[in-house]
Image (tube, grey):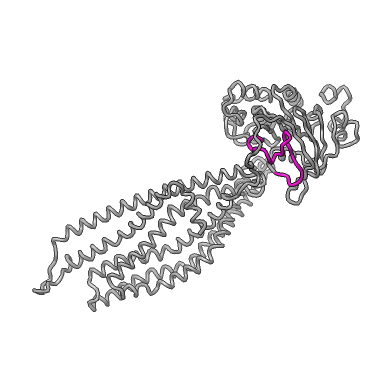
Amino acid sequence: MFQFQWVWHNMGNTQRKFILAVILQIIHPATALINPKLTELLVDWVVTGVTDPVTGEVVRRMDLLIPLAVAMCLVTAIRTAFGYFMIVCFEQVSQQTVKNIRVKMYQNMQANEMEFFDSYRTGDLMTRMTGDLDMVRHSIAGICRQLLNSLVLFVAALIFFFVTDWLFTLCILIITPVIFMVSNFYSRKIKPMYRGLRERMTELNTAAQENISGNKVIKAFAREDYEISKFDEKNKAYRDTNIFVNLYWMKFFPIMEMAANFLTIVVALVGGLFIINGRLTAGELMAMSSLTWAIAAPMRQLGTLLNDTQRFFASASKIIEIYYQAPTIHTKDNAYQPEKTEGDISFENVTFRFGKSTVLDDVSFHIKPGQTVAFMGATGCGKTTVANLILRFYDVKEGHIRVDGVDVRDWDLKTLRGGIGMATQDVFLFSDTAEGNVCYGVPDMSEEDVVKYAKMADADDFIRHMTEGYDTIIGERGVGLSGGQKQRIALARALAVRPAILILDDTTSAVDMETEKYIQGQLNNLDFPCTKIVIGQRISSVKNADQIFILDHGKIVESGTHSELLKKNGYYREIFNIQNSGMDVQDLQAVGVL
């Protein structure tokens, strides 16, 4: 099956070690037949003795007692050593294989576009990266090993039995066809159940992830009881599905257990009759009795192995879905890769749809290198989409987006994004130091430059007042910082890469007017050439732009400078009046709006 081929491929350079482990696994259970044979010799030659054909006397070979006992100890020691090295090999292969798969999955997720992350829940992806991968590991180190052990043990025991007495063996195997028919029926029924069980696990993980990420909102609205109740429902659904699957197995377990125990009865009855008839010796019966477990154990383990195998198929299928999820946005062969990005941007009749919803409708504009252009409009009008399309987080199907005269789809993806700095309102900071977050895009940046860009974003002062200054560890998503502080660190991070294009998506929405004015002053006097795209809702954030575009339902409905738009009786004038209601000309001049 494809899942097994996929696992084999991901073993990489441990394939030989896996083959060695398989060989050891074949030898290991086969050696289990040696001691029963030695026991047979011990009973027949030493304990009961053999009849001398000349004198008719029973002769006991006491001289064989110690050699046979030593041989049995040596066989046990060798078998134990084989078992040890076999398990070590299986574990090493399983861990390396899972590591290879996890790296490939993570690389694939990093390479995929935003649409990929829009399609998958975080909890689902985490389940695939953890629980499903652990099931793959268990399939190599556990299922594969146990399956081989059961198979080899079963076949080797049958060969031993057939060599000893074929009729006795047939009597033992009379129940085997029933076992395999029951197992096949169970396997077909249980497969969809394990898929459902895995979905319940995904829902549980998703609920936990959302609650952890949104804990501040939950507490703010005092919805702890509601979220606990919702999580409890998911937890109960997972528990109930687990119980249902296990109870379904319990319907078949008695049949398997009775069949395995039936062997003991057959051995006792048939073996006793064969000894009476002289068909078997006492040693032969003891040897076969001691090997009854070698046939019964695989029968008992069959159900568990089938359960685990179906779990493996369910988990592997989910992993493979991500593993082979090819990104639709990628770098073409011979892609455009200039040494420097100039910052010229043009949208040419761009229409972008997200699902059935049209986000941008036939949008065209041109931004010259070094210009500052602003976008305003109501929520959902397509402002942020403009930024996402320039960065090629999504691809357009209609129209062209060009940077420096070249369609973004023809650019080398890393070069394109490497020339763009972006700071958003919804800031994500890493669990790293303040310095590490500022120099995230340029890891080898000097300490002086880190401070320089922090000062430009007005972040230096509050960073120095933190517990350990720039070495202070910032929690996940900037826990412990105010919204404005997080935005300023994000802005410093964007400036630190000295981008040819700087995108500021509501970057100063959480800072006060004085801080915003300082930041705008710094942005107007950058020591490197930069085209700036400002997405904002404050008039004070956009009024100094060379061109302001007003978006409404995906279309540009107004454009012009601050003074030009004020003369029009449109959206911009309306927002200006709302934000400056009750202020006279001197007040407006004082706050820098006019």
Location of residue 306 in the rendering, given as x and y in whole percent from the top left corner: 47, 62
Which of the 4 quarters of the picture holds residue 538? Answer: top right
Percent across and percent down for residue 239 are 55, 57
Residue drawn at (83%, 26%) of the image = 593
Give the residues drawn in magenta, as a range. Answer: 395-416
532 lies above or below 217: above
Query: Horizontal and vertical percent for residue 350?
Result: 77, 43
Is residue 478 shown to the viewer in this render? yes
Residue 570 or residue 403, whichever sits in front: 403
Q: Nearer the viewer, residue 407 or 432?
A: 407
Q: Is residue 483 magenta?
A: no
Instruction: Work out whether residue 485 can be spotted.
Output: no
Residue farthest along the left direction in this orientation: 55
- With 226 as the anchor, is 128 left or right in this view? left
Question: What count of labels does the image hold?
Answer: 0
Q: Is residue 431 above or below residue 12?
A: above
Q: Judge whether residue 402 is colored magenta.
A: yes
Q: Give the residue at x 87% y 33%.
A: 573
The residue sitting at 12% across, 74% down in the picture is 53
Q: Residue furthest front?
A: 334
**Nearer to us in this view, 215 or 210:** 210
Image coords of residue 489 (percent x, y)? 65, 29
Nearer to us in this view, 150 or 209:
150
In the image, farthest residue toward the bottom: 277
* As drawn, 68 above or below 429: below
Dividing the image into 4 quarters, which one contains the C terminus? top right
